[in-house]
Image (cartoon, helix red, strand yellow):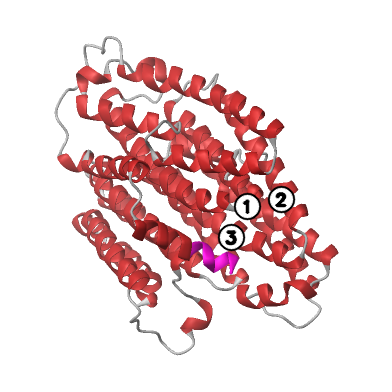
Amino acid sequence: MYELLIYFPLLLALMSIVLRNKGFSVYVLPVWSIVQTVIIFFLVFSKFNFLYHGTEKYFAVDNLSGLFLIITGFLFIGSSFHSIDALKERNKRDSSFYTFNLLVFVFAVNALLMSKHLGLMWVFIEATTLSGAMLIYFEKKHSSIEAAWKYIFICSIGVAFAFIGIIFLSAASTHSVDLFFYEMNHNAPLMNKTWLKFGYTFALIGFGTKMGLAPVHSWLPDAHSEAVWPVSAMLSGALLNGAFLAIMKLTRITELAGIRSFSSTLLLVMGVLSVLTAAVFVQKTKNYKRLLAYSSIENMGILSLCLYAGGGALFAALIHALGHSLTKASLFLTTGNIYRRYHSKEIFNVSGLISTDRMSAIIWIVSFFCIIASPPGLLFVSEILLFKELVQKESYGLIILLFVLLAAVVYGAAFGLLKICVGEAPLNIDKTRFPLRNYIPQIIFVSAVIILGIYMPVSFKSFIDSALEVITK
């Protein structure tokens, strides 16, 4: 069953190129996204599985990877249904190109999340660079070409840093140890601390680039502002989570090796820089998709700070990753509805959304309050847990700094994002109602974030706790 998540997207991708049938290219995405999510649930919650001999050595679906696979599955469903509208006016060549690269991207993310080997994880995160660049380039405008090249250039440098880090991690092993995570965890106390510090630093910079952590984040605003809305939803949820998972596993190795204070310092610096970067740039950003990208950088900073704090903040990290992925996907998918009506990504060219598309406006407002961690959303719970852990660590200076920076982010985001909904709409705006598929994914995503913020079932808590045991036991 594991193999289906790896081989089948590749098979469908090849079929879309060979057939070059527009109907196949458009509708294979929603069909496979639903099938894939069903398979993921079966793998995560069923003890019964089918494996070819040797496959289980390199890939596994435990509760930690399963959580991120489930998130990816739901984001893929929402993005696939929105892709129908993104492709319906395209020719069959463009449709095949888009479908091929999105399926390859999904394959790479699936394999990345299931990898038990650090080298394989590096290979698949590089594969997301190639397929992601093609998706960013899809509009074929000058700005999208520039964003795609920037994405390739910066992320390739980041991946090169991660590769150097892997070499250092190999050198840190006093015995001949393969780069399987369970072997590195077992042998962590015996690792050479100097080489391990070098390896973690380079790997953090490399994977942090893909995660969108400052100061190696600069690809992310351009990529999100130029990619079509279903691609932005996948980049903000699936890709960033994959890089975060890699950093979580590497941080665990430093903890077992006895140098947790070293890795915590790096995570603290990158976390604060990320929130600071978002707080500064949201004040002057005029593109609403670019503004959402800076919000992603802020939330990645929060995740980094959760890893820094440790303890109960690790639980907060996982639910924050879930809440951010669903909420940000809701916002990015709604930008598709906005752009198709106003044909502009500039905030000052969009107004009166509440009168032109009431459903999109409601989703936009609710999602906005969820993404800024307002109660009763899931992000409010996760940030409260983070601050609780920081109080226990007596990090009062950091708490005050975070309050100031997060307040600045809220102020800048509110001024930009909420303006879209008010005012008078331009007279030439098309008010034709979109199909329900343009709203249902966002409604489901943001509803889940609110419900889990109000009431977190015991079974959900147990699942998150079991996911944490993968990296803490």
Dominant SS of magenta comes to: helix
Q: Nearer the viewer, residue 60 or 318?
A: 318
Residue 227 x %, y %: 42, 40
Q: Residue 471 lies in magenta, yes or no?
A: yes
**Image check: 193 left or right of 462?**
right
Callout 2 touching callout 1 (CB < 8 Å): yes
Residue 232 x %, y %: 41, 42
Label annotation for residue 264: 2
Q: Nearer the viewer, residue 87 or 271?
A: 271
Q: Is any atom of residue 146 visible in this view?
A: no
How many residues crowd mark 1 within 10 Å: few (<14), some (14–19), many (20+)?
some
The mark nearer the N terminus, 2 or 1, is: 2
Residue 282 x %, y %: 53, 24
Q: Residue furthest front?
A: 392
Q: Which residue is mark 3?
A: 246
User: Callout 3, which amino acid?
Assistant: Ala
Q: Secondary structure at mark 2?
A: helix
Q: CA distance from mark 3 to mark 2?
A: 15 Å
Q: Residue 440 lies in magenta, yes or no?
A: no
Which residue is at 79% across, 72% downward? Answer: 191
Q: CA distance from mark 3 to mark 1?
A: 16 Å
Which residue is at 55% across, 19% downward? Answer: 284
Q: Is the C terminus in the top left, top right, bottom left or bottom right quadrant?
A: bottom right
Query: Residue 198 sits in which quadrant?
Result: bottom right
User: Callout 1, which amino acid?
Assistant: Gly
Query: Residue 435 sits in which quadrant?
Result: top left
The mark nearer the N terminus, 3 or 1, is: 3
Q: Which residue is mark 1?
A: 310
Span colored in magenta = 467-473
Which residue is at 58% across, 38% downward? Answer: 387
**Image check: 217 left or right of 132?**
right
